[in-house]
């Protein structure tokens, strides 16, 4: 059985460089791998292995912005780095989790900038759009969904009510509230109960180009990144301690989850925008 509920896009976010700060946007275009410009770049070590806030929480202080033909990166104490949206340098191979992926190295200037700020020898890579990085078919079924440098799926959806519930629990313990940046979603939805996203079958938006159909497929298991304060680039345990107390998920063998990994079933090239309303079908046992 299922029922339908109206949802509204209350937050729309890009993370152009994996594990760096997010960009809040008014509108974004859907592409095969999620939202255009999302997780298209990734910082890697000398062996091509990706690095993240798990080991380098100061990555949260790297703030991208998209300006004309450039991505502009800023960080405390650093001159701005301009990265062309229209150019790459040498082809390379990089590794994200168990996947070895075709990419492009973005050159020595970008490498030196990240190395100087983060205190390790690093380079910046850009995803090769000709490379097909398939999502796990165990969760997507017959749909051959793909993603770029996201951990495993094109989009992450979180309800605003889930953030509100977390903050209610934090404040009951005398801790400061947090915002959705801790969880790095692409879409924050109004209109659901707390963690109502856990039980959605489809999310549909009507656009001038046709229907956008998004399907939540896998609960998002959580590591240490929600404990990184994105405003300080430093970690504590407040968020992790609280969500561990109520977000153990039987669907993933008791792992701590928050938000739903989501694939694009229809609507590539359509545009999503803040305030857009849609219909969410909710599963019932």
Image (cartoon, helix red, strand yellow):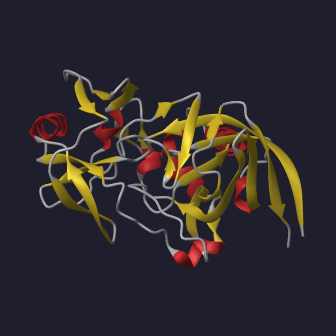
Q: Nearer the viewer, residue 160 or 108?
A: 108
Would residue 252 be seen by someone viewing this image from the given angle?
A: no
Point 40% across, 66% down: residue: 133
Point 32% across, 35% down: residue: 85
Please indicate whether residue 226 sits to the left or right of residue 30 in the image.
Answer: left
Q: Residue furthest front?
A: 209
The x and y percentages for residue 222 are 50, 58
Please indicate whether residue 47 sits to the left or right of residue 212 in the image.
Answer: left
**Could you say which quadrant of the image residue 110 lies in?**
top left
The x and y percentages for residue 54 are 34, 52
The x and y percentages for residue 244 are 56, 58
- In the rendered image, the quadrant that contains the N terminus is bottom right
Point 35% across, 40% down: residue: 20
Residue 50, compared with residue 163, is above or below; it is below
Point 31% across, 33% down: residue: 62
The x and y percentages for residue 200 are 75, 59
**Could you say which quadrant of the image residue 29 lies in?**
top right
**Could you say which quadrant of the image residue 165 lies in?**
top right
Residue 178, compared with residue 56, is above or below; it is above
Q: Nearer the viewer, residue 138 or 221?
A: 138
Q: Nearer the viewer, residue 248 or 258?
A: 258
- In the rendered image, the quadrant that contains the C terminus is bottom right
Residue 184, compared with residue 97, is above or below; it is above
Would residue 10 be seen by someone viewing this image from the given angle?
A: yes
- Could you tell me how many numbered marks the image carries? 0
């Amino acid at each position: 059985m299922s029922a339908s509920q109206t949802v509204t896009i209350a937050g729309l976010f890009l993370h152009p460089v994996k594990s760096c700060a997010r960009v809040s946007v008014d509108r974004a275009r859907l592409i095969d791998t999620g939202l255009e410009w999302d997780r298209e770049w990734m910082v890697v070590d000398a062996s091509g292995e990706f690095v993240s806030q798990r080991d380098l929480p100061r990555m949260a202080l790297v703030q991208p912005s998209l300006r004309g033909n450039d991505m502009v990166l800023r960080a405390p104490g650093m001159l701005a780095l301009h990265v062309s949206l229209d150019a790459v340098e040498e082809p390379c191979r990089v590794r994200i989790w168990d996947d070895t992926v075709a990419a492009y190295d973005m050159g020595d200037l970008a490498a030196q900038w990240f190395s100087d700020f983060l205190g390790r020898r690093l380079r910046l890579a850009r995803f090769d759009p000709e490379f097909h990085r398939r999502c796990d078919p165990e969760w997507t079924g017959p749909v051959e969904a793909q993603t770029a440098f996201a951990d495993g799926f094109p989009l992450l959806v979180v309800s605003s009510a889930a953030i509100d519930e977390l903050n209610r629990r934090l404040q009951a313990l005398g801790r400061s509230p947090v915002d959705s940046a801790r969880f790095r979603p692409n879409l924050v939805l109004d209109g659901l109960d707390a963690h109502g996203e856990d039980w959605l079958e489809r999310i549909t938006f009507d656009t001038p180009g046709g229907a956008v159909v998004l399907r939540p497929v896998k609960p998002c298991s959580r590591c240490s990144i929600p404990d990184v304060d994105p405003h300080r680039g430093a970690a504590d345990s407040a968020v992790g301690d609280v969500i561990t107390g109520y977000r153990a998920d039987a669907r993933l063998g008791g792992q701590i989850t928050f938000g739903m990994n989501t694939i694009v079933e229809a609507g590539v090239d359509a545009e999503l925008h803040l305030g857009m309303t849609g219909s969410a079908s909710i599963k019932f046992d």
